[in-house]
Image: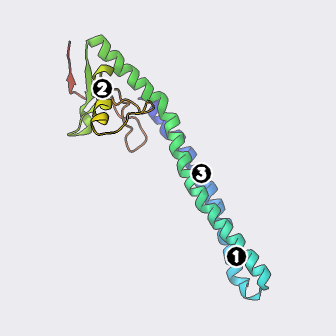
Amino acid sequence: MPESKQIESDLKTYGTQLEAQLKSKQTAFQTKLDAYQKGGAAMTPVVKADTEKELQTMQQGLQEFQQTAQQSMQQKQQTLLRPVLDKIQKNIDAVAEENGYTYILNSDSGSNPILLHGPKEGDVSDIILKKMGITPTAAAPAPATQAPKATGSGIPAAPAGKTKTKTK
């Protein structure tokens, strides 16, 4: 898809920005740590304690930034991919409607095909959950129509493979 290259480029740019921010924070921490290690013996106990506390705070800030950056990167990827995945799903649904398919499966997923399109009335998830003693929740997404999975590179997976079931 043409959007894939732009998404990949945007994610790379965003990732580079996050890495630059992280590197800046790491450099500041390392500079402060080096100064502490060189002059720590000459520091008064109060100054030494303040510097140690500051180093701990900086280290904790680094760890928090890494976690936040990772979450931010995942959120950015989801935000960029959502319109593409919606477009793919819309076209899968249109092909199913136009050609009279009840189910469309993605055969590219190996031995476990993924249902890309199917009727809502064919979804037995709630019945299975009840049989297992679990109360179904209204917020749980129905697996009958599932958006295609993204590949590891952050590029959307190709639409359905060759395996299709046509039921009229």
Question: In the image, what residue occupies the spot 72% across and 84% down?
Answer: 40
- In the rendering, at what x and y percent does residue 86 appear? 44, 26
Mark 3 Cα shell of 10 Å, populated few (<14), some (14-19), many (≥20): some
Query: What's the CA distance linking mark 2 and mark 1?
Result: 59 Å
**Left or right, residue 145 beside residue 86:** left
* Image quarter of residue 116: top left
Q: Which quadrant, please, contains the N terminus?
A: top left
Residue assigned mark 3: 18
Residue assigned mark 1: 52
Under circle 2, the secondary element is loop
Question: In the image, what residue occupies the spot 37% across and 29% down?
Answer: 142
**35 w.r.t. 41: above or below:** above
Query: Which circle marks residue 152 in the picture?
Result: none
Q: Amino acid at mark 3?
A: Leu
- In the rendering, at what x and y percent does residue 130 appear? 31, 34
Q: Amino acid at mark 1?
A: Glu
The nearer-to-camera label among 3 and 2 is 2
**Left or right, residue 141 beside residue 61:** left
Q: Which quadrant, please, contains the C terminus?
A: top left
Furthest toward the bottom, the residue is 41
First along the sequence among labels 1 and 3: 3
